[in-house]
Image (cartoon, rainbow, N blue to C red):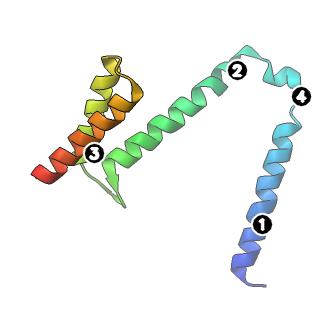
C-alpha cells in the first residue's frame, strides 16, 4: 500500500472519529448558553477569515488589488441596505472596472 493510500485511510478514520465524537456529546453540554453563543459566532468568524484571505492574498503573497475595491463597494452597499443581488453585482462591476483600468 502506498503512503498516499495510508494518508487517505488515516484521514478518513480521523474524520469519522471526530464526527462520532460530535454526535456523542451529551445534550446538556450543547444547551449551555456559552456554547450556543460561541456556536452562533463560528460561521461569522470563518466567513470573515475566508473573505480576508481571498481579498488580500495571491498564492503566498499579500497584495492589494482590484478585489479590495470590490469588497469595499460591497460593504458600502450592505451599509446602505441594498438587496443581495445589488451588492454582488455592484462589487463585481467595481472590481472589473478597476481591473480593466489598471
* Circle number at residue 10: 1
Counting from the top left corner in percent of width and height, residue 30 is at 80, 24
Apparent side of residue 39 relative to residue 77 in the rendered image (left or right): right
Whole-angstrom CA distance, mark 1 to mark 2, is 31 Å
Q: Which residue is mark 3?
A: 67
Whole-angstrom CA distance, mark 3 to mark 1, is 38 Å
The residue lying at 76 percent from left, 54 percent from top is 15
Which comes before the other along the chain, label 3 or label 2?
Answer: 2
Which comes before the other along the chain, label 3 or label 1?
Answer: 1
Badge 4 crowding class, 10 Å Cα cut-off, few under 14, some 14 to 19, many 20 or more, is few
Q: Which residue is mark 4?
A: 26
- For the N terminus, which image quadrant? bottom right
Counting from the top left corner in percent of width and height, residue 54 is at 38, 48
Assign a secondary structure to mark 1. helix
Counting from the top left corner in percent of width and height, residue 24 is at 89, 37
* Contact check, label 4 and label 3, Cβ < 8 Å: no
User: Which of these two is toward me, 54 or 18?
Assistant: 54
State whether residue 53 is above or below residue 32: below
Of all residues, the one furthest to the bottom in this rendering is: 1
Amino acid at each position: 500500500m502506498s503512503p498516499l493510500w495510508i494518508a487517505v485511510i488515516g484521514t478518513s478514520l480521523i474524520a469519522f472519529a471526530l464526527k462520532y465524537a460530535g454526535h456523542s456529546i451529551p445534550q446538556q453540554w450543547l444547551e449551555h448558553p456559552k456554547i450556543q453563543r460561541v456556536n452562533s459566532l463560528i460561521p461569522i468568524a470563518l466567513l470573515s477569515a475566508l473573505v480576508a484571505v481571498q481579498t488580500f492574498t495571491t498564492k503566498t503573497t499579500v497584495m492589494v488589488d482590484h478585489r479590495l475595491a470590490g469588497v469595499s463597494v460591497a460593504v458600502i452597499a450592505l451599509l446602505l441596505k441594498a438587496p443581495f443581488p445589488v451588492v454582488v453585482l455592484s462589487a463585481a462591476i467595481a472590481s472589473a472596472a478597476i481591473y480593466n483600468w489598471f
